Image (tube, rainbow, N blue to C red):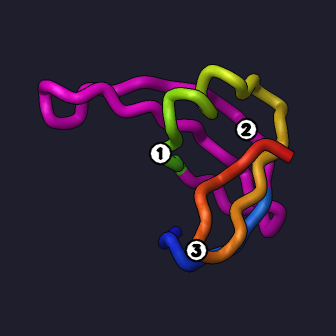
Amino acid sequence: MGHEDAWSGTVLKKSRELLDGSNLYRQVTVRTDDERTEKIRVSRALWKELSVGDRLIKDAGREPRRA
């Protein structure tokens, strides 16, 4: 899913990964309303705010936000 895509879905899992060995990336696994499962990188503030089962909305050209 790209930055210009719009979608909404439910958080299935929260994770943190050191993908490049020095930077910690926060990700959530989301099941979108059209039944796709995607890993989405989110900001630290949003990651701390989210829980499994929360709804996320992403408008085209914007960052994901909690519904």
Q: Secondary structure at mark 1?
A: strand
The residue carrying pointer 1 sits among few (fewer than 14), some (14 to 19) or many (20 or more) residues within 10 Å by Cα, namely some
The three-letter code of the residue at mark 1 reads: Arg
Which mark is in front, 3 or 1?
Answer: 3
Name the mark on residue 20: none
Q: Nearer the viewer, residue 47 or 40?
A: 47
Q: Nearer the viewer, residue 27 or 32?
A: 27
Residue found at x 77% / y 56%: 57
Q: Earlier in the sequence, mark 3 or mark 1?
A: 1
Q: Check residue 20 for magenta coloring.
A: yes
Residue 48 lies left or right of residue 51; in this view the side is: left
Q: Quadrant of residue 35?
A: bottom right
Residue 37 lies left or right of residue 3; in this view the side is: right
Q: Quadrant of residue 12?
A: top right
Q: Which residue is mark 2?
A: 11
Q: Secondary structure at mark 2?
A: strand
Q: Which residue is mark 3?
A: 61
Q: CA distance from mark 1 to mark 2?
A: 12 Å
Q: Earlier in the sequence, mark 3 or mark 2?
A: 2
Q: Earlier in the sequence, mark 1 or mark 2?
A: 2
Residue 46 lies left or right of residue 2; in this view the side is: right
Measuring from the top left, give residue 37's x and y in whole percent.
63, 54
Which mark is in front, 3 or 2?
Answer: 3
Measuring from the top left, give residue 65's x and y in whole percent.
72, 48
Measuring from the top left, give residue 32's x and y in whole percent.
75, 59
Q: CA distance from mark 3 to mark 1?
A: 15 Å
Q: CA distance from mark 3 to mark 2?
A: 20 Å
The three-letter code of the residue at mark 2 reads: Val
Question: Which region is colored magenta?
Answer: 9-38
Q: Which residue is mark 1?
A: 41
The residue carrying pointer 2 sits among few (fewer than 14), some (14 to 19) or many (20 or more) residues within 10 Å by Cα, namely many
Residue found at x 47% / y 45%: 41
